[in-house]
Every structure is written in structure tokens, then in C-alpha cells.
Amino acid sequence: MILNEHQILSRLVDPDPERRIIITPLVNPEEQFGPTSLDVRLGTDFQVLKRSNLTHWDPMKTPDAIQADLDLSMAHFKMKATDPFVLHPGEFALASTLEYVQIPLDIAARLEGRSTWGRLGLQIHATAGFVDPGFKGALTFELSNVSTVPIPLYPGVRIGQLCFFEGATTRLPYDEKKCTKYSGKISTASSAFFRDPEYARIRLANQEAVLAGR
């Protein structure tokens, strides 16, 4: 069941901490509430992949080496509220919500774009629009400009909206999942794909194959 604005508000002020949805700061509720959604704002941190001589992400490197490649390849920007981050046509950038979000164990959420920005060619996520029960932290925007005109994006502007779905209480909160990588982040977080356990197993198999061939 998708929650309407009254049900969302009820969850935001619920005295039971196990049922409460936390979204803070809630700057202007009158502007942010929709019939079945709550608008979220763009934060101040942005990451853009720089052009470099890196040919590809090699998941067979050690996690520390891949993290070093990421650190060298990502340009970081901290924007003031009055200064725009300009997303050029065909460009991809990471950002995060201004709000810290905490989802109770009987709620899942969807992060979606607002149509007013979609009509300008702004996409706010590639695949990661689902928010698991038990998630805590800032949500990541995967920003793409699919238009032919640069889009200036100011921190604090409402570019996304959250919808909430009520269900049975999960026994596996997001922050307790074995492979959780992004729980508790309060600013923009780049990909940690290389920390998935599949790659550890492949690296080990490759090492064993090399040793067996000696």
C-alpha cells in the first residue's frame, strides 16, 4: 500500500521510534508534500568522473587499489546554495539529498524524479531508486542530462520525490545485510561495486589458478 500525504505525516511524527520515518531537515513541508509523495532536495556535494588515462575499472585489482583509482578519477565539488552545479549534455554526476533519511522496518521507499525536471532532460537515478526498510543516511542521486542544453542545479532545489510503501516488518534491515556498503552515509558516496563478495571469490579463483599452473 502506498502512503498518502496524511499517512506520511503521521509516520513523520509517530511517537513510536520503530514506526517513525525520519527526514531531516524538512525545510518547507507545504512545498514538499504531494498527494502520495514527499519532495527531497539536492545537497551540496557533487562527484564527476574526470577524463583520464584509466581504460576501465578492473575488479580484479585489490579493493584498496580500485578505491585509489576511484579517488584519482573522481572530481569533488562542494557548492554554495547560491552557486549552481552545471550538468552538461551527456554528462553524469553523483550527488546526494540534502536530507538525512531513516526508514522503519515495515516501510520501503522509491526515489523518483520530479516531472518538472524530467521535462528538461534531467534524470536523477540510473537504476538505484529503491530504498530498503532500515536504510539510514543520505540518498544518492545519479544525475544525467539527456537534453542538448546544460542544466544549472542549485543546492536546496527539489529535484526528487520519495514515495513510501507499507508492508510486513522485515527481519533483515538494510544496515544489517551482509553486503551493505552505503548505510549511514551523510554525503555523496561513489560506487563500491568492487567490494561485492562475487569479486573476492573470482580474485581467489584466479590466484589459485595461477598457483596451480606453476
Image: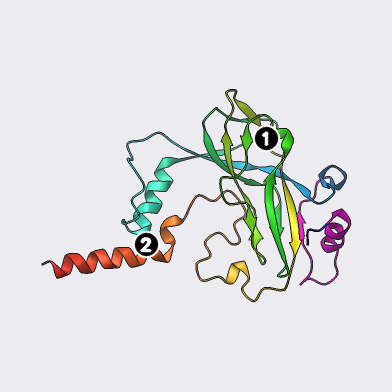
Residue 26: x %, y % from top left: 80, 50
Name the kind of residue labelled 1 in the image: Gly
The quarter holding residue 168 reads bottom right
- Compared across the picture, whether 168 is left or right of 52 comes to right
Q: Which residue is mark 1?
A: 118
Query: Residue pushed farthest bottom?
Result: 171
The tally of labels here is: 2
Asked whether residue 103 appears in the rendered view, the answer is: no
Any magenta on residue 23? yes
Instruction: Point out the tag, 2 or 1, that comes first from the N-terminus.
Output: 1
In this view, the residue in front, 192 or 75, is 192
Q: Is residue 67 above or below residue 208?
A: above
Query: Residue pushed farthest top?
Result: 149
Instruction: Give the residue displayed 33% in from the left and 40% down from the top.
Output: 54
Any magenta on residue 184? no
| Real-space CA distance between mark 2 and mark 1, rounded to the nearest whole angstrom | 35 Å
Q: Quadrant of the N terminus?
A: bottom right
Residue 157: x %, y % from top left: 73, 37
Q: Quadrant of the C terminus?
A: bottom left
Q: Which residues are magenta?
A: 4-27
Q: Is residue 34 above or below residue 18?
A: above
Instruction: Give the residue displayed 87% in from the left and 62% down from the top.
Output: 10
Name the kind of residue labelled 2 in the image: Tyr
Q: Which mark is residue 138?
A: none
Q: Is residue 9 above or below residue 51?
A: below
The quarter holding residue 18 reads bottom right
Instruction: Give the residue displayed 43% in from the left and 36% down from the top.
Output: 50
Classed neighbour count for the residue bearing mark 1: other residues with Cα under 10 Å, few (<14), some (14–19), many (≥20): some
- Compared across the picture, whether 136 is left or right of 1 comes to left
Q: Which mark is residue 199?
A: 2
